[in-house]
Image (cartoon, helix red, strand yellow):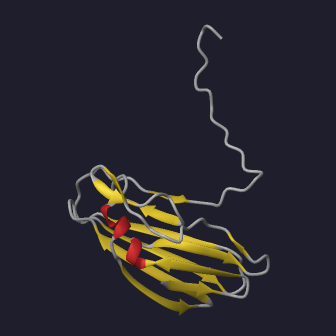
Amino acid sequence: MVSLENDQMRVKICPDLGGRVCSMFLKEAAVETLFFPRVIRPVRILPRHRLPEAGSELSFPISHSPVQLVPVLHVGHARSGQNLCLLRERELRFGMNWTVEYSLGETRCVSDQRTVFFNPDCDAHPWMSWSNAGVPARLDTEFHFPRGPRSSRS
């Protein structure tokens, strides 16, 4: 685990699980803001194994990335009043390199994520990118599902 910490919060990142953020703990309120299970059980979702959504995961360059369950390169350090964790990987099919920088300033109760992609050639490739965050459900949690487009019969 790589831990970024200031007086207000602690962020834990697991490079061994593809760079997943496993914890964002708010110190003053003593609250864990992310859901992360005590036991990790990968499940088969074709064509790869993956975890259920937990913590904050990186998902690129394709759908549920093959690196979501494997270690990625990482380095942690401090720069200009910020704690940083840099994660990197190279996508095998087209050679796209990605870097994710997580940072936590000295006085802010916010963690930033900056993602950079490098395409090694001039060709367009079918890549996509998103991050998911699993948050704990509470008694006042509500789920809203849109009804979709109105039909002419409604």
Q: Residue at x 58, y 85 (%)?
A: 4
Q: Nearer the viewer, residue 123 or 44?
A: 44
Check the picture and name the quadrant holding the C terminus: top right
In the image, taking residue 125 as reference, residue 147 lies left or right, namely right
* Residue 6 place in picture, x, y as percent: 67, 87
Q: How many marks?
A: 0
Q: Residue at x 38, y 77 (%)?
A: 16
**Residue 76 appears left or right of 7:** left
Q: Position of residue 133 (x, y in %)?
A: 56, 60
**Residue drawn at 63 percent across, 86 percent down:** 5
Q: Is residue 135 above or below residue 39?
A: above
Q: Which residue appears farthest toward the top when viewing the image?
A: 153
Residue 104 position within the rendered picture, expressed as x and y whole percent measured from the top left: 61, 81
Q: Quadrant of residue 8?
A: bottom right
Residue at (53% x, 73% y) in the render: 22
- The image quadrant that residue 134 belongs to is bottom right
The residue closer to the viewer here, 83 or 10, is 10
- Compared with 115, 16 (above or below) is below
Residue 132 x, y percent position in the rendering: 52, 58
Q: Quadrant of residue 90?
A: bottom left
